[in-house]
Image (tube, rainbow, N blue to C red):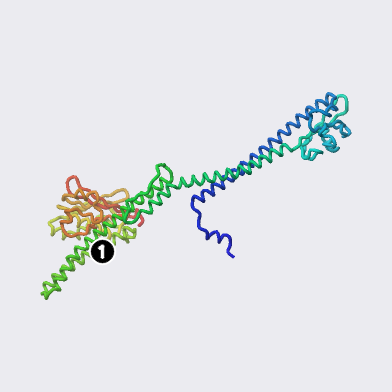
Amino acid sequence: MVSLRGRLSRLPPLPIRARLTIAFAAVIALVLAVAGAFLYSQLENDLDAEINASLRQEATSLATLVEQGRGDTIAGSEFGIAQIYGADARVFASTLRARGGRLLTRSEVAGAAHAPLRFDGEIPRSGAARVYALPASSGTSAPRVIAVAEPFDLRDHELARLRRLLLIAGPLALLLASFAGYELARAALRPVNRMRERAERITESELSERLPVPSQRDEIAALGHTLNAMLDRLERAVARERRLVSDASHELRTPLTTLRPEVDLALSRARSPEELRAALESAAAEARRMTRLADDLLVLARADQGRLPLNPESVSARTLMESAAARARSAAQLRGRRLVVRGDLGEDGLVYADPDRTAQALDNLITNALRYGDGTITLTAESGTDLVELHVIDEGSGFPEEVVERPFERFGRGPEARAAGPGSGLGLALVRAVASAHGGEAHARNRPDGGADVWITLPRRQARSL
């Protein structure tokens, strides 16, 4: 047999407006119940206090008559329900409404002769009532006991009337409050509905739409600003990825365009071994270029995912720079350029980095300086608080204005760089990816006296756990 909880679990979840309305109605019902109980109790206490005050006043007036020796005059008087008892507990005098029975038993008369007595009980001809008795002295006769009573009919009538009002007004107030709560919830969630409707129109091909944000400075407005900021980041990321795909396609099309005619030409007719060798060498060069581009894209993809593999160790910044200079010295000599390594920071120059990845970054910086810079290339290190800066400085014209603000952007090559020869435009992007993977940064600037200064920061020794 399916349990009640199982049946409820299969029901569709209620909308937020309904849940808010139910919660609001429950709270209002609790408030109304507590307020009604308090009001009923307060009225009951007030009516009881009024009855007690009336009984005390009437008993005091009767005591005055008894003291004056006129207790027998209460018969036919304006007093309500009252009796006067003698010392032998017999009724000495009684009002018209109290005739036909006793307000006090003999034991109660004996008790009231010593101290005032008050109790609720049944009295003849009037039903439920409150009785108040107290002793009274008489100058001409033995002590008396005075008893007065007040029926509960008027009190019970007022309490019953209040109960009827609460039973009518309470549900009506709960219904009105629930309706107001539902409308309030709908008004509060209206901006969310507008956001949802606008969000349904945002697609991968149309990311320029933004969610409407209410003018009030509340939580929903803060949510709208946060979601719009997220959409801004997504739009930039998608645009960057589209540009990356477009640029990668363009860069791959160039070697493919060169490679296919070389192969077609080699196969079009019989060739000499020298011609075939030249064609194969050209095809191999273009294949190596495509391989480098694919490898660079793979490294950048891993860096974007935070999964660029590193094998860090303590190594001297001077050693890294000298090794990079040694690898590039032949290429520099072919261009009539000179490589210089300056600065030995000693213990302050020890970095905790992956030598292979760092060498890849420095090689890219030097290649960039050889290809687009001029004059002597200087490699130097500067020590910071927790980081060491590795600089590559040239004496050329520096970065073009359209590139200096975004030198590490992928495929971010200027017109001069594109005209200078083949290149993927990923070299400096790889430099930044390597620096970021180590917990550092990559920077570039044009020097005031000419030339470009590009550098990366690496953590000193084991200051950072990788």
Above or below 67: residue 395: below
Above or below 288: residue 44: above
**Where is residue 243 shown, x and y percent of the image?**
26, 56
Please indicate whether residue 162 sits to the left or right of residue 136 in the image.
left
Where is the N terminus found, in terms of image quarters? bottom right
Please indicate whether residue 193 sits to the left or right of residue 334 in the image.
right
**Where is residue 392 shown, x and y percent of the image?**
21, 53
Above or below 357: residue 152: above
> Which class describes the residues within 10 Å of circle 1: few (<14), some (14-19), or many (20+)?
some
| Residue at disc 1, secondary structure | helix
294 or 13: nearer the eye? 13
Q: Which residue is mark 1?
A: 294
37 or 362: nearer the eye? 37
Q: The disc labelled 1 sits on which kind of residue?
A: Ala
Looking at the image, the residue that sits furthest to the bottom is 270
Identify which residue is drawn at 38% across, 52% down. Answer: 199
